[in-house]
Image (cartoon, rainbow, N blue to C red):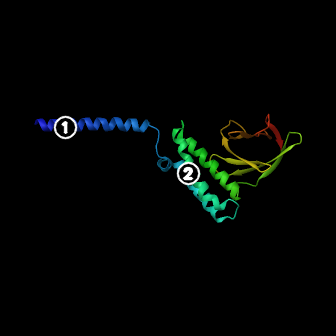
Amino acid sequence: MTSSSRTVACLLALATSAALALGASAAQAPPRDVDLLVRQDAALSALDRQLGDAVADARRTPWAGRRQLSLRQQRWRSSRGQCLSDRDPKACLANLYVTRIAQLSSDAGLPPARPPFRFRCDGDPPLGFTITYYATNPGTLVAERRGQKIVMVQQPMASGIRYTAANASYAEHQGVSWITWPGQPRPLRCVR
């Protein structure tokens, strides 16, 4: 083997080693492209399609925010980038998607998974709330009181159900409902 052949072989071996090392570190590096992450994950792709359907339905439905829908959707899409620095980017994105689907469905008056229900909670005077469930995975609901809407996402539980948002929660267990609402000092016991 000639000197130049050995040099080429050596450079090729070094390049291969560097590529393998770079590939291993790239696999551990956080993703840098939200759209690529969504395309590569079946669950996120399904949520993206579900959101696309909700946006299309909202565009066909007359409602107060329809004119701003494109701008709001563009802002929402830009906000997804925050998940890239999250400890679990896929879970963060899934939460953003289901929250957006439920919020858009509620704002546009799209059909919920089941009819909304009203209930009264402890308080002086008693507080009234409306809960509307939306068919997302994980499940979502929109809790509404006096025009204020909060989208909550279902959380895993051993028994009963629990939905949470940054500043609110709703839970049902053994026929009893509890809601935590901004401005309330403690969870409120509720009945239908």
Residue beneath the point at 70% across and 55% down: 107
First along the sequence among labels 2 and 1: 1
Which residue is under mark 2?
Answer: 77
Q: Nearer the viewer, residue 158 or 131?
A: 131
Which element carries disc 2, helix, strand or loop?
A: helix
Which element carries disc 1, helix, strand or loop?
A: helix
The amino acid pointed to by label 2 is Arg
Residue beneath the point at 81% across and 38% down: 188
Q: Nearer the viewer, residue 12 or 161?
A: 12
Using residue 94 as the reference point, say whether residue 21 is left or right of it: left
Can you tell which mark lies on residue 98?
A: none
Q: Residue furthest left?
A: 2
Q: Residues within 10 Å of mark 1 (few under 14, many from 20)?
A: few
Q: Residues within 10 Å of mark 2 (few under 14, many from 20)?
A: some
Task: Residue 61: give x, y in percent of width and height.
Answer: 67, 64
- Does the image show residue 81? yes
Using residue 55 as the reference point, say whether residue 16 is left or right of it: left
Say which quarter of the image contains residue 183: top right
Task: Residue 24: give x, y in percent of width and height.
Answer: 38, 36
Q: Do the numbered discs 2 and 1 sit on residues whose CB atoms are within 8 Å?
A: no
Task: Residue 123: give x, y in percent of width and height.
Answer: 86, 39
Say which quarter of the image contains residue 168: top right
Which residue is under mark 1?
Answer: 9
Using residue 79 as the reference point, say whether residue 174 is left or right of it: right
Task: Residue 148: give x, y in percent of width and height.
Answer: 75, 48
The amino acid pointed to by label 1 is Ala
Using residue 26 as the reference point, say whether residue 95 is left or right of it: right
- Does the image show residue 192? no
Residue beneath the point at 14% across and 38% down: 5
Residue beneath the point at 59% across and 59% down: 70
